[in-house]
Image (spheres, rainbow, N blue to C red):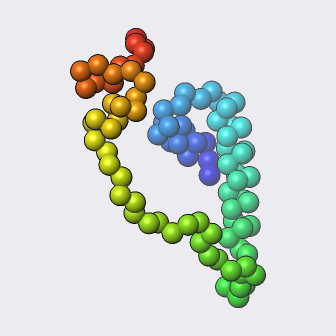
Amino acid sequence: MNIKDVENLAELARLDLSTEEKEVILHDMDGILAYVKQVEEVEVEDIKPDTELRNVWREDVPEAREFSSEVITEQFPDSQDGFLKVKKIL
């Protein structure tokens, strides 16, 4: 990776970087890429997980629910003429 690569990435991200910032990012990226290369070298083909993967959540069961405008307006604290009244935000 070189300064041109950093400049290209900065342009894609629409960042305006100084020369010092580009050099710092280049140094950081070199460290990150070296770490990724080190992780890629680890052999994991023969490793078996020592835990059993299973779903610990409940099963999805559809429940019949009634959603109508009357039910919703009855549950809402303030309504008028079938509309829900909320605080003005603008």
Residue found at x 67% / y 40%: 25
Horizontal and vertical percent position of residue 58: 56, 66
Vertical position of residue 71 compared to residue 53: above or below? above
Residue at 51% across / 69% down in the picture? 59
Could you tell me which residue is drawn at 44 percent across and 66 percent down? Answer: 61
- Towards the viewer: 64 or 11: 64
Does residue 17 appear to the left or right of 52 in the view shown?
left
Q: Does residue 48 appear left or right of residue 62 in this picture?
A: right
> In screen coordinates, is 38 left or right of 80?
right
Q: Residue furthest bottom?
A: 46
Q: How many marks?
A: 0
The picture places residue 73, in percent across and down from the top left corner, at: 33, 30
User: Which quadrant holds residue 56?
Assistant: bottom right
Residue 75 sits above or below residue 45 on the image: above
Residue that appears at 43% across and 24% down: 77
The residue most toward the left is 81
- Judge by depth and name the residue closer to the eye, 46 or 17: 46
Q: Quadrant of residue 75?
A: top left
Residue 43 in view, yes or no: no
Q: Residue 72: in sight, yes or no?
A: yes
Residue 71 spot, x, y in % from top left: 33, 38
Looking at the rendered image, the quarter that the C terminus falls into is: top left
Q: Nearer the viewer, residue 89 or 64?
A: 64
Is residue 12 depicted above or below 89 in this figure? Answer: below
**x, y percentage for residue 63?**
40, 60
Vertical position of residue 20 compared to residue 32: above or below: above
Please state which of residues 89 and 2 is positioned toward the viewer in this rendering: 89
